[in-house]
Image (cartoon, rainbow, N blue to C red):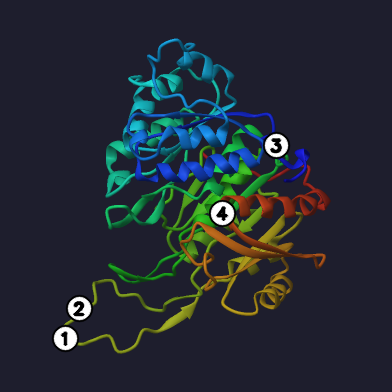
Amino acid sequence: MPPASDLRFLGKRIVLGVSGSIAAYKAVGLLRALAREGADVTVVMTKSARRFVRPLTFEVLCGHPVATDLFAAHQEMLHLTVPERADVIVIAPATANVLAKCALGLADDLLSTMVLNASCPLILAPAMDGGMWDHPAVKAHAEALRGRGVTVLEPEEGPLASGRVGRGRLVDEGVVLSAIEARLCPRRDWVGQRVLVSAGPTQEAIDPVRFISNRSSGKMGYAVAQAARERGAEVVLVSGPTALEVPPGVEVVPVCTAEEMAKALISRFAWSTVTIMAAAVADFRPKRPSLVKIKKDGASLQKLELEPTDDILEMLSKQKTNQVLVGFAAETEEVILRAKEKLKRKGLDLIVGNNVVAEGSGFGSDTNAAVLVDRVGRVTQLDLLPKRALADRILDALRELVVTSKRRAHPQPYGRT
C-alpha cells in the first residue's frame, strides 16, 4: 500500500455510475483502482446494469450499499444527498441512452436524476456497439455535453461484443483515472505559456484521389494539446487529417500537406513559448502530381518520382530565439541512440522517442511507451502509459526547461481572427 501522501484521490468522494453495457464488468476494476487511490466511492447502478453485474459485487468492494432505486423505501432522498456530497460523478460505462438523457436533461431513474441535481464535475466514459458512436444523434449529444463542460471520453476502437470491429469499447481504466485527476486535482502550472502543437499525418497528392501518407492517428499530439490546455496554457493545435475531436479550449488549424503544415507552424512560431512537434510529417512527396485521376487501364504507372519535403523541425530550430522546441522520434530500433542523434542534429530542447513496432506503442494505439532525452543529457524511460498520461509526463519534463528559458517581454502575435 503506497503512503497516504501518494494516494491521488485520498478523501475524495466519487460517485461511480454504472449503466447497462456489456462493459459493466470493467467498472469493477475501475472501482478497485479508485479504492487503491484512496477514494470514497458510492456506486449507482441502472436497472439494465444490474442484469450484467450484481450489486453485491460493488457493495463488497466499496463498503457502501449500492444505490439502485429512485423510490427505495425508508431511504434518504438519494437523488439529492448523494450528488450533494460528491466531488465528481463518473459514469463508466455510459451507454448511448445515458448520453442522450444527460444531454437532454431527462431524469427517469436514480442515476439520471442525480446527474440533473449535481453541481460537481461529470465524466462520461461511453461504451456501445455497432456504429452507434458515429450516429449523428450520439455525436450531437456528446458535443452538447462537452460544450457544457462535461468530460466525454472517446471510446476505443477494436473488437466489440457483437463480433464487429469498430469504435465503441470502454477506454482503459487508466484513461478514466487520468480524467478524474484532471477534474479533481487540476494543475495550473502552465498558465502564461503559449504552446504550439502539431499532430497527425500529412497527405501528399499523387493525383486528385490518391495520396502518400503514414499511419499516424494524431492521438499523441491531441493528448499533449489537451494536457497543456487543462494545465492552463494557451494552445494552438496545427493538425493534419484525423478523425479526432478537438480538445475543449484548444484552437485548431487544419492542414493537409507538409507545405501547409510548415506555413502554419512558421507563421505562429514567434508567438509560442513552447512548440511541440508531434506530427508525422511526410518526408517525401510526388514531384509531379497528376491533375487528373490516373487510370488503371491503358498506360500503367511505371514510376512515381518523389522529392523531399521541407524539414519543418530544422526550419523552426533556425528561427528559434527563446522558444522551447520539442521533437518526436518514431523508431523501430536503437530508440535512445537515434533520439539523441536527432536531438543534437535538430537543435532541440527535448525529444520523445518511441518504438513504433513495440506492443501497445504503435500508430493508432491509445497507449505509448517512450524515452525522454533533454538538452542537458537526461534520459528518462517511461513504461507503457495511456497517451493522455504520457502527455502529462512530457509536460512535467518540460517544466524546468521552460522555466530556465528566457521569456520574451513582447511576444509577437500571429494575427488570429
Residue 66: percent from left, percent from top: 48, 27
Q: Which amino acid does label 2 sit on?
A: Lys
Residue 85: percent from left, percent from top: 58, 19
Residue 268 visible in this rendered orientation of the protein:
no
Residue 218: percent from left, percent from top: 49, 57
- Circles 3, 4 touching at the beta carbon (< 8 Å): no
Residue 88 visible in this rendered orientation of the protein:
yes
Gap in angstroms between the C-alphas marked 3 and 1: 62 Å
Gap in angstroms between the C-alphas marked 4 and 2: 43 Å
- In the image, taking residue 35 as reference, residue 172 lies left or right, namely left
Residue 248: percent from left, percent from top: 51, 38
Gap in angstroms between the C-alphas marked 4 and 1: 49 Å
Residue that mark 3 sits on? 188
Gap in angstroms between the C-alphas marked 2 and 1: 7 Å
Residue that mark 4 sits on? 386
Q: What residue type is labelled 1?
A: Gly
Residue that mark 1 sits on? 298
- In the image, taking residue 206 as reference, residue 184 lies left or right, namely right
Between disc 4 and disc 2, whose residue precedes?
2
Q: What secondary structure is found at the residue carrying circle 3?
A: loop
Between disc 3 and disc 1, whose residue precedes?
3
Q: What residue type is labelled 4?
A: Pro
Q: Which amino acid does label 3 sit on?
A: Arg
Gap in angstroms between the C-alphas marked 3 and 2: 55 Å
| Foreground: disc 4 or disc 1 | 4
- Circles 2, 1 touching at the beta carbon (< 8 Å): yes
